[in-house]
Image: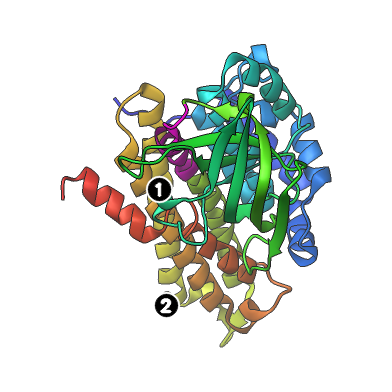
Amino acid sequence: MMDFSLTEEQVMLKESVRKFVNKEQLRELARHYDEIEQYPFELHRKIADLGWLGLCIPSQYGGSGGDLMSLFLLIEELSRGALVAGNIVFRNVVNAGLSILRNGNPEQKKYFLPKLARGELIFAFSLTEPNAGSDAAAITTSAVREGEEYIVNGNKVFCTGAAVADYIQLAARTGQGGSKYDGISIFIVNTKAQGITIRKIKKMVNKAMETNEIFFDNVRVPAKNSLGTLNKGWTHLMDLLSFERIFVSAMCIGVTQRVVEDAVEYAKNRVQFGKPISKFQAIQHKLVDMQMRLDAARLLCYHAIWLMEIGKPFKQSVCIAKLAASEACVQNSQEGMQILGGYGLTMEYDMQRYFRDSREFVVGAGTSEIMRNAIAKEMGL
């Protein structure tokens, strides 16, 4: 029986995050970091000090434990305040912490997880290449064994946070022959290693989280930094992508919530033809549709999380949730721009940032087209 009621602890977590968002004025910080296009290290530190980077990491590794639903709520509420705040948790807890927890060996867990929980390390995840985007298994970046090291050569692109990260979780090809899905392995690579060149990619979305292109020129990586089973990295990546997609959805829901709140507030205060525009049926219908999309997407996300928590098949539900949440964010922010009219086009209102940032969600972690393909496959089509 499905029950999406929040536990007392989850309600307390939501309230704590809301208070943090207001106290730290994350709305204003979001504007600031979007303008200067820099990673908010101070905000990272504050989130770590509250123990939130240890959520879902077992206490034996310095975390607080916690379930996936609590992590979803944390990322959703932080993203409602500032997308970059949700992204800090997403990059370091989901892409790094959960990945190492599920696939790391005892030594890797003992070394990396406590440091991640304390906020002492920043991780990035790198899969995409110039000629391997949606066709992720087409990667050609190579890692060749040489004694107790691997020599990495290749080119990665669209790696979020590489320039500020201490380590990159890197997908590379270690074997040939057979299926293209075979022979892929995952490595934890120190960004200070000789032979790594990182270039900033200018973009219009999520500007506080720098996106990079990375070049690897005979980069030496210790063999002990291989993560998971050698040559079976594709299975690891598919596992990671499911987690990535549901928690990208959490960021979508957080931003979409703020979009609706801002649009409603503006409509109630904007007076035209002698009354607030919220009294016009055309505007009311837009706002109602926005709320409906938000509620539907949130419930789809909760359903997917529920399936993940009880150990039932969840791949299709995760893809549906990610598709619905990301497209709701795009559609709602576009309608929000229309409701604000000329003011929506100005930088002093946040709606333009929501609109810009929403475009990342229908591309990153699997495009809307790839999500539909994956859902169709699960349907047996």
Report x, y in % for residue 299.
39, 43
Dot 2 lies on which element? helix
Of residues 117 and 336, the one nearer the viewer is 117
Q: What's the magenta region?
A: 230-246
Q: Which quadrant: the N terminus?
A: top left
Mark 1: which amino acid?
Answer: Ala
Residue 241: in magenta span: yes
User: Label 1, label 2: how many angstroms apart (C-alpha)?
Assistant: 47 Å
Of residues 164 and 304, the one nearer the viewer is 164
Colour theme: rainbow
What is the tally of numbered marks visible in this picture? Answer: 2
Mark 2: which amino acid?
Answer: Ala
- At x 57%, y 71%, the residue is 267
Examine the rendering and report whether any part of residue 208 can be seen: no
Dot 1 lies on which element? helix
Left or right: 273 as drawn, with respect to 135: right
- At x 50%, y 31%, the residue is 69
Q: Nearer the viewer, mark 1 or mark 2?
A: 1
The part of the image, by quadrant, that contains residue 46 is: top right
Q: Which mark is residue 259?
A: none
Examine the rendering and report whether any part of residue 355 can be seen: yes
Judging by the rendered image, the residue that carries numbered circle 2 is 282
Judging by the rendered image, the residue that carries numbered circle 1 is 137
